Amino acid sequence: MALGESEVPTLAEWAGGPARFKTLFETFYAKAPNDPILAPVFAHMDPRHAAHVAAFVGEVFGGPKAYTEAGGGHAAMIRKHMGRHLTQEQRRAWVALMLATADEVGMPDDPEFRAAFVGYLEWGTRLAVINSAEGVAEPEGEPPMPVWGWGPPGGPWLG
């Protein structure tokens, strides 16, 4: 079935699949240590970090379950943020740099995709700040992986 006939692509498909997320996060995390607000968070980042985040976000957006199949899950992502004491200033800087990087690497810029993308970034970064605070309890069990879709627009505008 050709795109636009009746099947709505996932956000991951519309974005360009795993390779596009890999490029996005590799480019982003190459810049993050040079940002004065983000440097304290990412100065000593694991070299595999970009690949893990690309797999996580790609899976959340409906792509391959690479993060889960590699032994990750939503609880693992929550644990990665615990005790990091992230600030709202760092969260806002992360989102701003991510959006600039998305433009740079050619992520789709149609209103429907960007609405879903920005919505996820806002939701995810706000959870990261919450989960990074002092005294946050370990996740119980294995909460399901988030699933992010097109939301109210229902799919891309195809002209």
Image: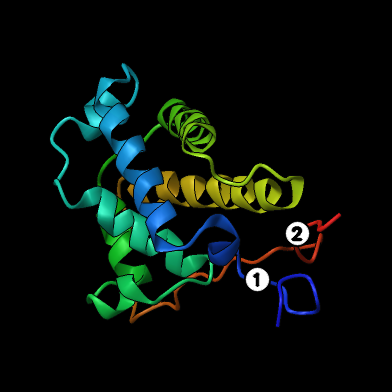
- For label 1, the SS is loop
Report crowding for label 2: few under 14, some 14 to 19, many 20 or more residues within 10 A (C-alpha): some
Q: Is residue 11 visible?
A: yes
Quadrant housing the N terminus: bottom right
Q: Residue at x 51, y 38 (%)?
A: 102
Return the x and y of residue 29 as percentages of the image width and height.
Answer: 29, 37
Q: Residue at x 42, y 77 (%)?
A: 143
Q: Is residue 117 left or right of residue 54?
A: right
Q: How is the image coloured?
A: rainbow
* Residues under numbered marks 1 and 2 in contact, where contact means CB atoms less than 8 Å apart: yes
- For label 2, the SS is loop
Q: Which residue is disc 1 drawn over?
A: 9
Q: Is residue 111 left or right of residue 137?
A: right
Report the amino acid beneath label 1. Answer: Pro
The quadrant in which residue 74 appears is: bottom left
Q: Residue at x 13, y 35 (%)?
A: 44
Q: Which residue is disc 2 drawn over?
A: 156
Q: Earlier in the sequence, mark 1 or mark 2?
A: 1
